[in-house]
Image (cartoon, helix red, strand yellow):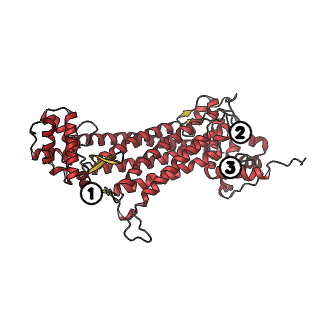
Amino acid sequence: MTEDRPFPDPVYAETVLEPLFEGAKTHFAGHVREINRAHLVMLAETAILPDATAHALAHALVAIDTEVDIATLTYTGAYEDYFFLVEAELKRRLGAELAGALHTARSRNDMDHTVFKMALRAQTDQLQMQAMALAEALIDTARRERDTLIVAYTHGQPAQPTTWGHYLGAVIEVLLRDLARLDAARAGLDHCPMGAAAITTSGFPIDRHRMAELLGFDGPLENSYGCIAAVDYVTGLYSAIKLIFLHLGRVVQDLQFWTAFEVGQLHVPDALVQISSIMPQKRNPVPIEHLRHLASMTAGRCDAVINTMHNTPFTDMNDSEGEVQVAGYAAFASGGRVLALLRALIPACRVRSDRVAANMEAACVTITELADTLVRVEAISFREAHEIAADTARAVVAQGTALSAGHGAFDAAFRARTGRAPALSAAAFATAVAPAQFVAVRTRHGGPAPAPMDAALARYGTELGALRATHTARAARLITAHQACDQAFLRLTED
């Protein structure tokens, strides 16, 4: 039997405690500082601590901030973690009894989850700003490209004409819904766990609402057990983030397809194109590939955090704490890169109208409007009109002629199906199968015609404005809280 060694075991220190210390030093130290100050203010205001004790602790915390360079600290094993290092610094300055007073009515449990929420708050606010900037860029681009014709594809095949602006409108709507989900998850970060202590709050007359106010939260999280056990603020947030990049990844796939040489619907400018090292003719829009893999990596990183919570006990546990929290920040980093790159790429791309027109003619994408027109003009059923339109499309494709020049094929198809001559003249036929006409008559709510597009773009701007207002209000609350906490803390240092 080996003799017991003092804590920590070197392997445990190297594999667990040191990485946790580095994570706390990098991501959480500033938030621990805020909590220490706010908690001391609350203890003094509620008279849980006498003025002299609060005064001494405030001076010691200021001294630690001034004298300890957190960035240069390395884990030595002398203290279990960053929390105990700060407590040791207090003891060195004040003695054990006085230093220990700061920890009255709190636990590392409620501190940890408060710290994690504060860190995620900052990360999420930044991601929201980037996502809203992308939404704004997409709205501007959709407005600019409201009338620019493109081929819409279904099942990988040319389907119908629409506009670049109409397509982007669909992307905008999904992004706005994703932003609403992210905003709801951000609201879940706005309830403060402080005061829950280990599990059941405290017998001391603490003021949980005051703690929440000083730390910039909307209020305390009510159930104290849930404060340390419920990690839905983590799973809900990363689920919302994942959906953003899952959905944007689908758009990236379209960009990849549309920029292929054989399709050529979208042109990527030279500033966002790389050349081959050996094939001088190649124009490789590789930013699209980077968008695809970064979006996938972001979604995967979100899954890693969410899945770590699977089948964990509903109580305080390390599975949701330091190391997992830090790992999740990589999702914000890669996700931010996706949002920034998409914001640069999409407005810079231009539709190749010549290729669009050629593909439309070759694929007969306006043939649905011919069928609709026949219902209105010839007073036949849509099913019969559909069959005549299908016969017309097959004939012009077989003849290798453009649909716009296919009145003869249409006339023959109509006579064969109905036994009479069509009323639709050659000029009316050409109008019916014109791509611009196809879009212009689709004036229903949500369609690609100018009127519904203008209404949709106005609504998108209003929704984005509301999200920005909420974001701005939260930022203002945080600034006010920081100022109030600093002022209250400084009063404790006054002689």
From the viewer's side, name the closer residue of 493 and 152.
Answer: 152
Residue 103's disc is 2
Kindly identify the amino acid type of the residue bearing the numbered disc 1.
Arg
Confirm whether residue 486 shows in the render: no
Residue at 74%, 43% in the rendered image: 99
Q: Residues within 10 Å of mark 2 (few under 14, many from 20)?
A: some
The answer to whether 292 appears left or right of 461 in the picture is right
How far is mark 2 from mark 1, CA to CA? 70 Å
Question: Element type at marker 1?
Answer: helix
Counting residues from the N terminus, which is met first, the one under dot 2 or under dot 1? 2
Counting residues from the N terminus, which is met first, the one under dot 3 or under dot 1? 3
The image quarter containing residue 410 is top left
Kindly identify the amino acid type of the residue bearing the numbered disc 2.
His
Counting residues from the N terminus, which is met first, the one under dot 2 or under dot 3? 3
Q: How far from the left and from the top, in percent, is residue 283? A: 38, 65
Residue position for label 3:
20
Kindly identify the amino acid type of the residue bearing the numbered disc 3.
Leu
Residue position for label 1:
355
From the viewer's side, name the closer residue of 204 and 308.
Answer: 308
From the viewer's side, name the closer residue of 454 and 290.
Answer: 290
